[in-house]
Image (cartoon, helix red, strand yellow):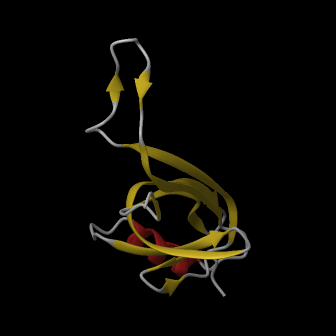
Amino acid sequence: MSLIKLDGVGYNVGEVGVIKRSFDIQIDSVTAGLLMDGSEVADAIATRESFDVTVEPRGGDKAQYDAFVEDLTAPKSPRVVTLPYAQGEITFAAKITSVSDVLRKAHNGNRFGGIQFTVTQLKPRRVVG
């Protein structure tokens, strides 16, 4: 079973190395600002999550890795992404904002690995109300 899926497709690319979660607390731009006494009004209205993911190629299939990179870098939007989350998983509509990997020279040809990518929710999962 793949820990990461893109548009419902899982790839045998190796091991998930790191998933770093970031939470962006979004402020209502209409009501935010400074008051006459210098205090600030900042009404939180939603939390949008981003994930920086690193996948190590250990034990993965080279052809699957290449297909995974092609899929990640395809100019498609929105993407449906499934990632590990808390004690289960989370699936959400996302944009992929960056993808990078490293060329590793092998005795039988080139091998890329250590792919890193960032996905951000298109719609906040947690909103006030």
User: Which of the 4 image quadrants contains residue 123?
Assistant: bottom left
Residue 125 location in percent, x, y? 47, 65
| Res 38 quadrant in image | top left
Task: Locate the N terminus and report the quarter of the image it occupies.
Answer: bottom right
Please indicate whether residue 75 sits to the left or right of residue 123 in the image.
left
Rendered location of residue 129, percent (x, y): 43, 61
Q: Residue at (63%, 76%) from the top-left corner?
A: 89
> Looking at the image, is 104 positioned above or below residue 15?
above
Q: Please count the marks in the image.
A: 0
Name the foreground residue: 3 vs 93.
Answer: 93
Up the image or down, 127 lies above or below 93; here it is above
The x, y position of residue 58, in whole percent, is 72, 69
Residue in front for this viewpoint, 92 or 27:
27
- The residue shown at (56%, 81%) is 11
Q: Residue furthest top?
A: 37
Residue 39 x/y as whole percent = 44, 18
Residue toward you, 16 or 38: 38
Q: Residue at x 34, y 43 (%)?
A: 28
Image: 11 above or below 104:
below
Up the image or down, 19 lies above or below 61; here it is above
